[in-house]
Image: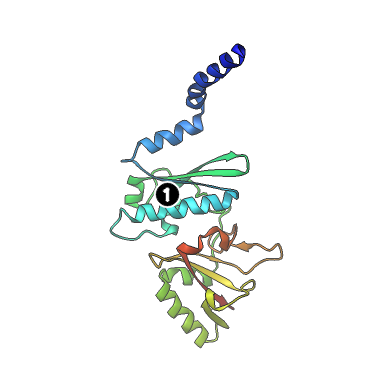
Amino acid sequence: MKRILTTAIAFLLATPAIVAQNPTLKKINDIKRQRDAYFWCETNHANADSALAYATFRLLDEVNSHRSSVMTLADLQPLTKHIRIDRGSQTRIFVYARKDEVARGTAISPTPSPATSTTNFVPDAFTQKIIERKTFNSIYQYLRALKAGKQILLFGPLKDVSDYTELHLIVFDIHTQQVITILSPLTQNQTRVNLLTGVTDSLENYPQDMVAVIWYMK
């Protein structure tokens, strides 16, 4: 019993030193302490991509709560960095951005966004024209004009359809009404493609209570 107690005490005394020596946790704690220098958010999820999406979305809300003008997710993503920690079945994602870079809208030392394709992906012209409209109302009116001109077959709110596997999905921030991204119909692998980045994505990566969705069919 004495040996067990001695071992337990030694472990408890050593734990702070172990944590202090972990460079990843140290970096996270250093950033958290610099409230005047950084915006940050973190989340845990069983799916790493979902964890990153949730954390980034929450960071966007945090940033916009301190701004007079609205910043979109597309504006913020190039300014963000993230730290990933795998813990058993859960993934912890810590996302952060420098406040001075957010204020300028440009990074001091640009780095690839976590959600951006590693290749030089360029959205097609149709996608770019939608994104240029930026807001829900503007894009809705644009789609109405496209349908009238027979450039798309149909469009409408997601709540009006039960099966949207073959539909393109335009995802908006429900609070700011700004477009976040556009997702392709389901592929043969039962996944969607983010048409802004070219990487695999899913509607499940965007919390239902935080987004609005318009679908369209070409």
**By what rule are the colours in the image chosen?**
rainbow
Q: Is residue 152 at least partly visible in the picture?
A: no
Q: Which residue is mark 1?
A: 79
Residue at the extreme left of the image, as rendered:
68
Q: Residue at x 48, y 24 (%)?
A: 16
Tell me where residue 122 appears, x and y as whole percent.
54, 61
Q: Could you tell me the amino acid type at mark 1?
A: Leu
Q: Nearer the viewer, residue 186 or 175?
A: 175
Q: Secondary structure at mark 1?
A: helix
Tell me where residue 167 appears, x and y as whole percent.
60, 73
Q: Quadrant of residue 69?
A: bottom left
Q: How many marks?
A: 1
Q: Is residue 216 at least partly visible in the picture?
A: yes
Q: In this rendering, is residue 62 above or below 87?
A: below
Q: Classify residue 38 as left or right of residue 57.
A: left
Q: Classify residue 149 as left or right of residue 65.
A: right
